[in-house]
Amino acid sequence: AYSITYDSAGASQAISVVSNSRITFAESGLYNITVNAQVLSTNASAKDVRFWFRQNGVNVDNTTRLQTLTGNAEYRPFSMTHKLSVAADDYVEIMWATTDTSARLKAAPATAYAPASPSVQVIITQPAL
């Protein structure tokens, strides 16, 4: 299993990224965390890809999502949302694993008609204080 690392952060309020992978919350509350990932398969063998949430170093039960990829040079979008209750200074990591190293998180480059896309995007909202 690998924690997803981030090389940039967008607008945020009381949320920061620590050690490149820990999404840290300054305020306690209930948060919706949405993950949009883009996985590239570089061969045609079947491979399973799993994503899940880890809070304060502990896997969060019943958050794993699984997808099987079988295409060569195939980009596959992946999305999941989960509500987590956090205390001030808690951190959340997005974890992922694959049964074959030919599956990887991959940003797509810009084309003549479309802008580039990130390999992973995390969107966090706080529906309740």
Image: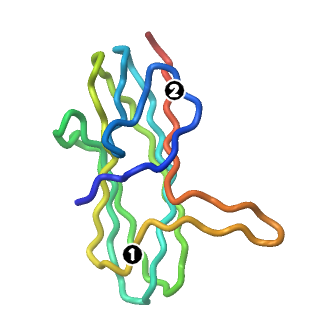
* Residue 47 located left or right of residue 11: left
What's the residue at 50%, 19% (across, down)?
127
Residue 37 image point, x, y percent = 49, 57
Q: Residue furthest top?
A: 129
What's the residue at 29%, 79% (across, down)?
100
Task: Name the element at disc 2.
Answer: strand
Q: Is residue 76 above or below residue 96?
A: below
- Sequence order check: which comes first, mark 2 or mark 1? 1
Residue 90 image point, x, y percent = 27, 25
Residue 75 image point, x, y percent = 55, 73
What's the residue at 27%, 58% (across, down)?
2
Residue 23 image point, x, y percent = 36, 35
Q: Disc 2 designates what residue?
A: 125
* Residue 109 located left or right of residue 69: right
Q: Is residue 62 above or below residue 43?
A: above
Residue type at mark 2 is Thr
Residue 118, by quadrant, is bottom right
Q: Disc 1 designates what residue?
A: 103
Residue 63, by quadrant, is top left
What's the residue at 59%, 30% (across, down)?
11
Q: Nearer the viewer, residue 112 or 68?
A: 112
Q: Nearer the viewer, residue 15 or 97?
A: 15
Residue type at mark 1 is Ala
Task: Name the element at disc 1.
Answer: strand
